[in-house]
Image (cartoon, helix red, strand yellow):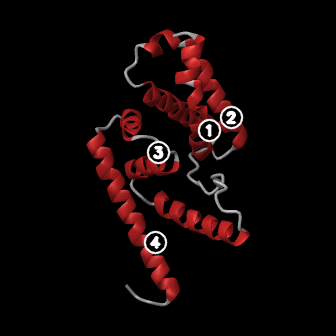
């Protein structure tokens, strides 16, 4: 794999790699370091990488494993994902506050999901990965990924509905 091919196929993913690393590590500096370390590791393996069927999936799997290794070395697993950067789509401060509150509620619910459902939900809805990439990362079939994501979303939706019905003063 040439430097140009590497830049097109791997380095171009770094903008999607950082949010995933940040979600897993919950620290900007550690996330940047993780992405950089993984890019260096992949550059050193570029000959093997070119032969791989799903380069995107392999890149994200490598990043995930590297982040989990970092967490094991540094501290116990921290599943507080409330520091996810704001997308910046809405500039109203009250809307940002509402979005932040809603995000923290969704994250609190997601933390209580079974581990595989939580991982699938985070990888798909928070990190924006494709089903094929998630399947490779978690070593599951795409159809199973879809089922797990559907169940996770259904559970989150039901609990959100319960919370908002309670806040409105109605009983579901």
Disc 3 + disc 1, Cβ < 8 Å: no
Real-space CA distance between mark 3 and mark 1, rounded to the nearest whole angstrom: 13 Å
Q: Residue at x 42, y 40 (%)?
A: 130
Of label 4 and label 2, which has the lower sequence position? 2
Q: Which residue is under mark 4?
A: 160
**Disc ID at residue 126:** none
* Quadrant of the rendered image containing residue 14: top right
Q: Residue at x 48, y 64 (%)?
A: 109
Real-space CA distance between mark 4 and mark 3, rounded to the nearest whole angstrom: 20 Å
Q: Which residue is under mark 2?
A: 32
- Classify 10 Å Cα crowding around label 4: few (below 14), some (14-19), many (20 and above): some
Real-space CA distance between mark 2 and mark 1, rounded to the nearest whole angstrom: 7 Å
Disc 3 + disc 2, Cβ < 8 Å: no
Of label 2 and label 1, which has the lower sequence position? 1
Q: Residue at x 66, y 52 (%)?
A: 85
Q: Which residue is under mark 1?
A: 18
Real-space CA distance between mark 4 and mark 2, rounded to the nearest whole angstrom: 33 Å
Disc 2 + disc 1, Cβ < 8 Å: yes
Real-space CA distance between mark 1 and mark 4, rounded to the nearest whole angstrom: 28 Å
Of label 3 and label 2, which has the lower sequence position? 2
Element type at marker 2?
A: helix
Q: Which residue is under mark 3?
A: 123
């Amino acid at each position: 794999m040439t430097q140009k091919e590497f830049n097109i196929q791997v380095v171009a993913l770094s903008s999607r790699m950082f949010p995933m690393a940040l979600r897993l590590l919950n620290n900007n500096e550690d996330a940047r370091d993780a992405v950089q370390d993984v890019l260096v590791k992949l550059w050193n393996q570029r000959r093997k990488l070119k032969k791989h069927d799903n380069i995107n999936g392999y890149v994200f799997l490598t990043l995930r494993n590297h982040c989990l290794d970092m967490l094991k070395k540094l501290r116990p697993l921290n599943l507080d994902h409330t520091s996810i950067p704001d997308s910046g789509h809405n500039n109203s401060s009250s809307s940002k506050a509402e979005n932040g509150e809603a995000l923290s509620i969704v994250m609190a619910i997601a933390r209580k999901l079974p581990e595989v459902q939580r991982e699938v939900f985070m990888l798909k809805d928070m990190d924006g990965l494709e089903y094929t990439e998630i399947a490779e990362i978690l070593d599951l079939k795409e159809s199973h990924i879809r089922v797990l994501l559907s169940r996770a979303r259904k559970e989150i939706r039901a609990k959100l509905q319960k919370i908002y019905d309670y806040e409105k003063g109605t009983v579901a």
